[in-house]
């Protein structure tokens, strides 16, 4: 995707020319009142080896898919524009439905809003399927894994010194069999958990819809805590308070606060120190995200008295330099920026040069900034609302307001109500999209809450649902996507008021999207509250930094420090570093829907991975991170095949980290890739 013309000098001139020309535009001809009904085409395709039928409500689709091939009739229909079509997949006897791709994801009912032509792919697999038990840690751990009583054939798998027995550790089941696995540790050992998505440390239950290897991890009683709680590296000093932090596609980290200049730091060479980058204006409390070409857009900021700025600038990671961009219509302090499926950028909220709440969203386009004048909405202090691209292509407002909404950015814009959150006050909590269309919102409020809730925007009528809460109440914390798809929460405070230091939460917490459960991690030494930030590095570690320079904390007493967190997936049960898969080569660019190959010496142990969009984070919200899960199939002894995201509503264009994850749940070091059309 070419950079938006708005963000070039030629684009600024074009925007001014268009604005001038529009002043003398003649009155348009009165349109006809008899508008024709617009119809949009929905097309169903098939993949896999299985057979099944996809039907729609309202009727129109009745698509038979045989051995992955759709019939010549019944697989395409036209629906009135704006209608929501619900698709249901029904596998044939002995076959399993593996999930949707294209305009939908997941395995439930697929709801498609027909605002444009849509394409949906249904994956069916032919059974029976083989389930194998492996060890999560080779050479370590004794225990036994059994299937539920009465199931034939049975799994009764003994694991000794991390090696499964030759018999009893695999079985073949008809499609859609419900399998419940129970792990029992031998004397002197403990069960450390399943290294399989959706399973924690209890029973592992799932429907058998594909060939699957399930790793069970046993460790000696009293095993080193890093394998269970992770480990923090010693804190190191930073030259400024890192309030705004960004993982660049070059591998470097860019950060800045209010006082002093921006800084570059290389996680791959941490002892090399920091490189100063002079700021072009006061970009403190600005909004920012990565453009489709990997450059960092920064909008707004502050002047004397925290008055919002109209200015915009772009940081080029390759030249390490700033370039001017067209100014917005209104100043913004504390705005949220969101890259749209089109590659354009939405700016929402903040306050302007008069310190009034900015109610009109703006979209950066090839012709300048376009104001969504029909979509005014006051999202007041503390600003930085949590916004995400939904699978339907609209922008979802998750908070802070208790009523959550979609924003349609076409034309002059339009808000529609989706659902009320279960907990209305989540101010300064943290929200993250942990899978396409699925959002976790945790913490926030005053006094802070430990509660959490989720919403699935893939559903036909999304609703917020309560899930188990954190161990510690907190606000002003950060939620970070990890390389394996889990979510790490760091920092924050459980005390009352805006930024209570006495109630600082030091222990991190890890959320498993499969089980919707939390695990308590090792404590961070430093206090990370207001103006702290955290992001995922290509190494799979998490950088936690900043805090202070505001919120009642003087500059002298602020946190000029950073720490690296090593998640449990980087360790063996004995505390030694886990053997990691590696990427020998991978494409530097992925087009939507493209089949691609990754070369690795570990092809036999990798079946999944993740694309994670690079982080751009401040004030408890990461405006750029997105995860897209990948499923890999072997392609020879050193190759893995996968398919890139099917469209920009599931993975907005821009820079991503590609991680491989092996059967033990251990990720590779990431390869930087660009995803786009």
Image (cartoon, rainbow, N blue to C red):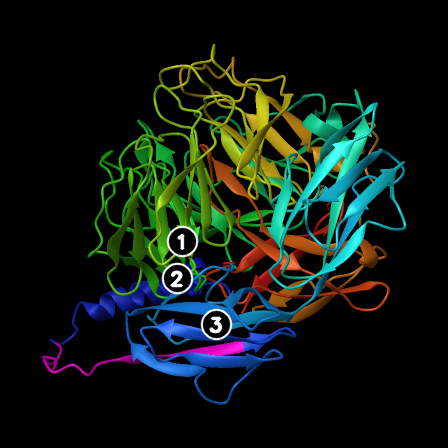
Find disc 1 in the rendering and name its residue.
457
Image disc number at residue 120: 3
Q: Earlier in the sequence, mark 1 or mark 2?
A: 2
**Mark 1 or 3 closer to N-term?**
3
- Vertical position of residue 581 compared to residue 7: above or below: above
Please report the residue visible at 67 percent of the width from the left and 49 percent of the height from the top: 250
Label pair 1/2, CB-CB below 8 angstroms: yes
- Residue 16 point in image, percent of width and height: 30, 63
Say if mark 1 contacts mark 3, CB within 8 Å: no
Left or right, 193 with reference to 471: right
Could you tell me how far apart the alpha carbons at marks 2 and 3 are, in whole angstroms? 12 Å
**Where residue 334 sits in the image (x, y, percent)?**
36, 36
Q: In the rendering, at what x and y percent does residue 490 appear? A: 55, 28
Residue that mark 2 sits on = 392
Q: Mark 1 and mark 3: span between their CA atoms?
A: 16 Å
Give the mark nearer the N terminus: 2 vs 3: 3
Q: Identify the magenta region.
A: 28-45
**Mark 3 crowd level (few <14, some 14–19, many ≥20, 10 Å Cα):** some
Q: At 61% across and 50% down in the image, what residue appears?
A: 206
């Amino acid at each position: 995707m070419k950079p938006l013309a708005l963000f070039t000098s030629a684009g600024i001139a074009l925007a001014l020319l268009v604005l001038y020309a529009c002043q003398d535009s003649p009155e348009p001809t009165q349109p006809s009142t008899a508008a024709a009904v617009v119809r949009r085409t929905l097309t169903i395709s098939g993949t896999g080896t299985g057979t099944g039928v996809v039907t729609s409500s309202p009727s129109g689709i009745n698509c038979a898919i045989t051995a992955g091939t759709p019939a010549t009739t019944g697989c395409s229909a036209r629906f009135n524009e704006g209608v929501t079509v619900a698709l249901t997949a029904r596998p044939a006897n002995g076959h399993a439905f593996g999930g949707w791709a294209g305009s939908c994801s997941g395995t439930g009912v697929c709801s498609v809003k027909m605002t444009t032509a849509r394409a949906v792919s249904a994956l069916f697999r032919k059974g029976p399927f083989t389930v194998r038990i492996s060890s999560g840690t080779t050479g370590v751990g004794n225990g036994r894994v059994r299937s539920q009583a009465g199931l034939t054939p049975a799994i009764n798998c003994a694991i000794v010194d991390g090696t499964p027995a030759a018999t009893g550790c695999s079985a073949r089941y008809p499609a859609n069999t419900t399998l419940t696995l129970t792990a029992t540790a031998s004397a002197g050992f403990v069960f450390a958990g399943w290294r399989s998505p959706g399973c924690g440390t209890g029973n592992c239950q799932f429907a058998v819809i594909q060939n699957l290897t399930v790793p069970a991890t046993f460790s000696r009683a009293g095993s080193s805590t890093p394998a269970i709680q992770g480990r923090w590296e010693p804190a190191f000093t930073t030259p400024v308070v890192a309030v705004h932090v960004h993982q660049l596609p070059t591998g470097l980290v860019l950060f800045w606060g209010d006082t002093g200049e921006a800084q570059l730091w290389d996680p791959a060479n941490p002892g090399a120190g920091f490189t100063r980058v002079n700021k072009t204006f006061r970009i403190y409390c600005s909004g920012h995200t990565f453009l489709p070409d990997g450059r960092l857009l920064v909008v707004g900021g502050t002047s004397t008295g925290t008055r919002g700025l109209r200015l915009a600038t772009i940081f080029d990671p390759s030249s390490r330099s700033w370039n001017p961009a067209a100014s917005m219509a209104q100043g913004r302090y504390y705005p949220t920026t969101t890259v749209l499926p089109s590659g354009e950028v939405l700016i929402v909220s903040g306050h302007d040069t008069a310190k009034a709440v900015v109610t009109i969203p703006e979209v950066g386009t090839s012709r300048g900034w376009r104001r969504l004048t029909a979509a005014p909405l006051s999202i007041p202090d503390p600003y930085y609302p949590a916004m995400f691209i939904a699978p339907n292509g609209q922008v979802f407002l998750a908070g802070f307001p208790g009523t959550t909404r979609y924003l349609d950015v076409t034309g002059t814009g339009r808000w529609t109500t989706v659902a009320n959150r279960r907990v209305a006050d989540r101010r300064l909590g943290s929200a993250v999209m942990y899978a396409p269309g699925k959002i976790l919102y945790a913490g926030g409020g005053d006094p802070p809450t430990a509660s959490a809730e989720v919403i699935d925007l893939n559903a036909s009528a999304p609703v917020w649902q309560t899930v188990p809460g954190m161990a510690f109440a907190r606000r002003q914390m950060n939620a970070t996507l990890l390389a394996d798809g889990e979510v790490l929460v760091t920092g924050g405070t459980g005390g009352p008021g805006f930024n209570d230091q006495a109630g600082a939460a030091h222990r991190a917490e890890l959320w498993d999207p499969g089980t919707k459960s939390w695990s308590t991690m090792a404590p961070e030494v430093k206090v990370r509250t207001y103006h702290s930030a955290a992001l995922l590095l290509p190494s799979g570690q998490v950088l936690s930094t900043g805090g202070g320079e505001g919120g009642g904390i003087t500059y002298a007493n602020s946190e000029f420090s950073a720490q690296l967190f090593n998640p449990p997936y980087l360790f063996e049960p004995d505390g030694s570093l886990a053997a990691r898969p590696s990427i020998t080569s991978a494409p530097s660019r992925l087009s939507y829907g493209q089949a691609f190959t990754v070369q690795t010496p570990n092809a036999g142990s990798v079946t999944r991975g993740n694309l994670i969009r690079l982080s751009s984070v401040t004030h408890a919200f990461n405006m750029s991170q997105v995860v897209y899960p990948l499923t890999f199939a072997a392609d020879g002894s050193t190759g893995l095949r996968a398919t890139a995201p099917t469209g920009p509503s599931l993975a907005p264009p821009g820079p991503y980290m590609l991680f491989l994850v092996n059967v033990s749940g251990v990720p590779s070091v990431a390869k930087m890739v660009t995803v786009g059309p």
